[in-house]
Amino acid sequence: MLDISTWFNDLLAGNTIFTANTLGYYWEGLVTTTQLVFLSLIAGLILAVPLAIMRSSKHKWISLPVYLYTYVFRGTPLLIQLYIIYYGVVFVDGIQESFLWPVLREAFYPALIAFTLNTAAYTTEIFRGAIKSTAKGEIEAARAYGMSQNLMMRRIILPSAFRRALPAYGNEVIFMLHASAIASVVTLMDLTGAARFVYARYYAPFEAFLFVAAIYLCLTFAILFFFRYLEKKLLAHLRPQDT
């Protein structure tokens, strides 16, 4: 049975698994998690903007393929998508003889592809909803100024939609941070993978996983603070003015 007082005293005294070596594993995991989440969010955002515009199209032949893509990736677990891409890439004919194989055989890049496609699907639907909710008055005013559809999309609809989508997109960023914990199942040394390694080596689950949970918590608070700041700046015109 675990003696909580003894464990806590050892923790304060530094007689736990928090050595230079184990902190190195945690740092490696933090770097891997940050890179994976950041790159997948950037790539997913780049993909989501044109896909959201296509998804908002009135032409079925344009919007339907995007709808099927978002339906599949939002309707299936991210873990299954990761397994399919990580293990399935080996069965693509000729892939092991191609120039892509040195990259794809590393676990990081299949995980990056899976995370990017997943977050792009969710972000596409977030932006599509924001585009659809653009006030008709804004569109009519832009047309009255003689703006073309492309110019109106670039100057009026997309900036307005981005501001409205900001709260929902902030939740998506936090979701991707938390979902990145599954990356360790494909041998990546992310934060969760570092905690598992330390636990297996030192048999100290409380210290390992509580420490990693604290890191995730700090990252989440940092993301929340960043998006609250953006909302305050970009949505200031929506707040009631003091008289």
Image (tube, helix red, strand yellow):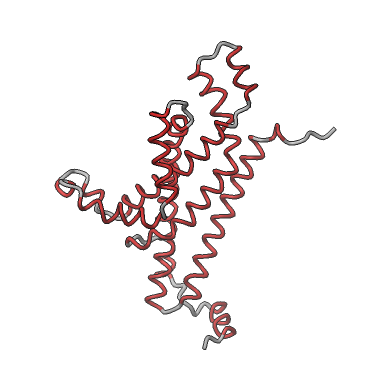
Pick whichever, 70 or 219, lies toward us. Answer: 70
Residue 64 screen position, x and y as percent: 40, 34
Residue at image location 21% in from the left, 53% down from the top: 90
- Identify whether 146 is placed above or below 117: above
- In the rendered view, does 180 fall on the left or right side of 110? right
- Identify whether 24 is placed above or below 85: below
Pick whichever, 156 or 204, lies toward us. Answer: 156
- Identify whether 7 is placed above or below 235: below
- In the rendered view, does 87 fall on the left or right side of 180? left
Residue 227 screen position, x and y as percent: 59, 44
Residue at image location 60% in from the left, 29% down from the top: 134
Look at the image and tell me whether residue 68 can be seen.
yes
Look at the image and tell me whether residue 28 can be seen.
no
Residue at image location 39% in from the left, 45% down from the top: 117
The residue furthest bottom is 1
Residue 119 screen position, x and y as percent: 44, 46
- In the rendered view, does 121 fall on the left or right side of 186? right
The residue furthest right is 243
Pick whichever, 42 or 58, lies toward us. Answer: 58
Residue 100 screen position, x and y as percent: 22, 45
Residue at image location 48% in from the left, 19% down from the top: 150
Quadrant holding the C terminus: top right
The residue furthest front is 60
